Amino acid sequence: MAVRKILVPLSGAETEAAVLGTAMTVAKTFNAQLVGLFVRPDPTEALPYLGDGVSGQVIEQLMQAAKSGSDQASDKARTMFTDAASKAGLPMAPKAAGNTPLPSVRFLDVAGHRDDVVAAHSRLSDIVVFGEGNAGAAGGSTLEAAMMSAGRPVLIAPKACAIHVGGTVAIGWDGSPMAAHAVTAAIPFLEMAKSVTILCIGNHGDEAEPGSLLADYLSLHGISAGIHTAEQAAGRSVGGALLDQAEKLGADLLVVGGYGHSRLREFIIGGATQHIRSHATIPVLMAH
């Protein structure tokens, strides 16, 4: 499947400049449209929590303050988005549907609950791009909404803008359904890559040749992939080992499955997904 629509949720934070740079790189690579989505909270959703004793004047002031804050954040996000598009040489798509030039960009300002709105727009997007979150884990709950609720692959952008994405690809492979979904979502990248390596970390039980089944599958798509196995160092997470090995290979994209365990378990005691979301130094394509 061709990549034609890439979604990047925006909040107006300064850290999103690097995320946009990476997203623009991917849009140009695939001749796709990049949609910047700013979601402003609906101030009326907070009214039930104010109580019955709050005057109409106070409510009006609070709603006006919320709108003013959203307007400022939206303006920042729009300016950052248009500047990044101009730097990348991507034109703004016309509002009318049809005859949309590619590659191009489009900016949307939508009111509603952020996770719900992003999930709804993600369902008709090929990739959703996220960067570092306030708590360190890229995308926060919004990434989970796109990947888990909407069922779309997500691209985690590193702190520094990635000028190249997908020339040298590493696949974190454990044979799980999540890893398989990530591989199929990454086929457009893999078909364009100059080098693909299957990374198998740790013990793979009775599997005589870890990764060989995946290599056979990829060969049917015309993709030649090498296999690299590595032990998991004591005290080192699988996520950390995958990132380390990918960097040693000089990869500019890591493909992995997300949330092999429950999200609650990973949040409490950690896991590969949480580690990668918090420590990605190269672009990571993840799917559940």
Image (tube, helix red, strand yellow):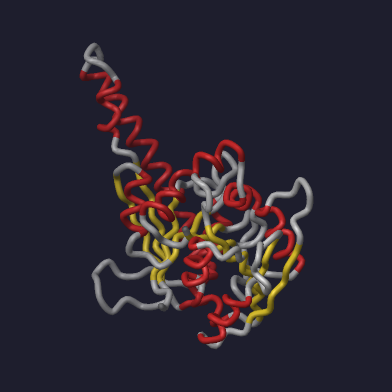
What count of labels does the image hold? 0
Q: Nearer the viewer, residue 63 or 160?
A: 160
Nearer the observer, 43 or 262: 262
Question: Where is residue 65, by image quadrant?
Answer: top left
Q: Does residue 4 sit above or below 123 in this rendering?
A: below
- Direction from residue 7 to residue 161 in the image, left or right: right
x 61%, y 51%: residue: 272
Residue occupying image coordinates x 69% and y 75%: 227
Location of residue 30 with respect to 109 vertically, above or below: below
Residue 197: x percent and y percent? 66, 74
Q: Is residue 60 left or right of residue 198?
A: left
Is residue 273 or residue 90 the one in the foreground?
273
User: Which residue is located at x 64 percent, y 82 percent?
Assistant: 194
x and y, in percent, of residue 145 in the image: 40, 49
Give the vertical position of 203 relative to 268 (above or below).
Answer: below
**Horizontal relation, residue 279 to residue 132: left or right:** right
Instruction: State the residue at coordinates (54%, 40%).
Output: 265
Give whichever of 227, 6 is nearer the camera: 227
Camera sees residue 83: no
- Mark yes or no: residue 60 visible: yes
- Give percent across and percent down for residue 148: 41, 53
What residue occupies the far front of the structure in this picture? 206
Q: How far across and how far down the image is residue 159, in percent?
A: 63, 54
Which quarter shows the N terminus? Answer: bottom left
